[in-house]
Amino acid sequence: MESPKPILDFEKFDDGFVQKLVYDALVWSSLHGFVIGDKTYQRSGTVPGVGMMHAPIALLPTPFPESYWNQACEVAPIFNELVDRISLDGKFIQDSLSRF
């Protein structure tokens, strides 16, 4: 089976463009709260602004098999129902989050 052609040829990107793209993405993430705690900092999550880093992000599209897309479409309604039911159960949320 022949591998699919890439959507974008990443090798042709100029290094300056890539560095600016990464910088802009990190700034955007910080300004919009797209951050997570970094466990390498002992005080992360207990002191505001300490030990934060950008959440994982993909800057460019990544191809994946159509079968995975179809599987995700099949599972999505079930997952959405699960999230909806959990969001209505305040005690479950409180108990779950209090463990962290």
Image: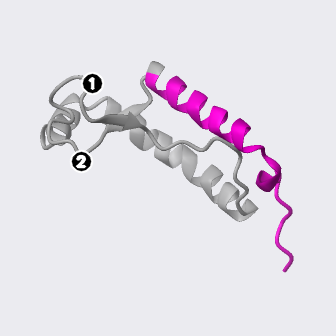
Q: Quadrant of the C terminus?
A: top left
Asked whether residue 76 appears in the rendered view, the answer is: yes
Looking at the picture, how far across and down is residue 80, in whole percent?
49, 40
Residue count near mark 1 (Cα–Cα under 10 Å), binned few <14, some 14–19, many ≥20 = few
Left or right of residue 82, residue 27 in this image? right
- Closer-to-camera residue (37/82): 37
Q: Is residue 85 left or right of residue 76?
A: left
Q: Look at the numbered disc 2 and give the secondary structure of its residue.
A: loop
Amino acid type shown at disc 2: Thr
Q: Which residue is mark 1?
A: 49
The residue under the point 50% across, 48% down is 78
At a point 54% along the width and 24% down the height, the residue shown is: 28
Question: Which residues make up the magenta segment?
Answer: 1-30
Q: Would you say residue 26 sits in the magenta stretch?
A: yes
Decide if residue 63 is on the left or right side of residue 58: right
Question: Up-down: is 94 above or below 3?
Answer: above
Q: Of marks 1 and 2, which one's residue comes earlier in the chain? A: 2
> In the orientation shown, which residue stands out farthest toward the top?
31
Residue 79 versus residue 25 in the image, above or below? below
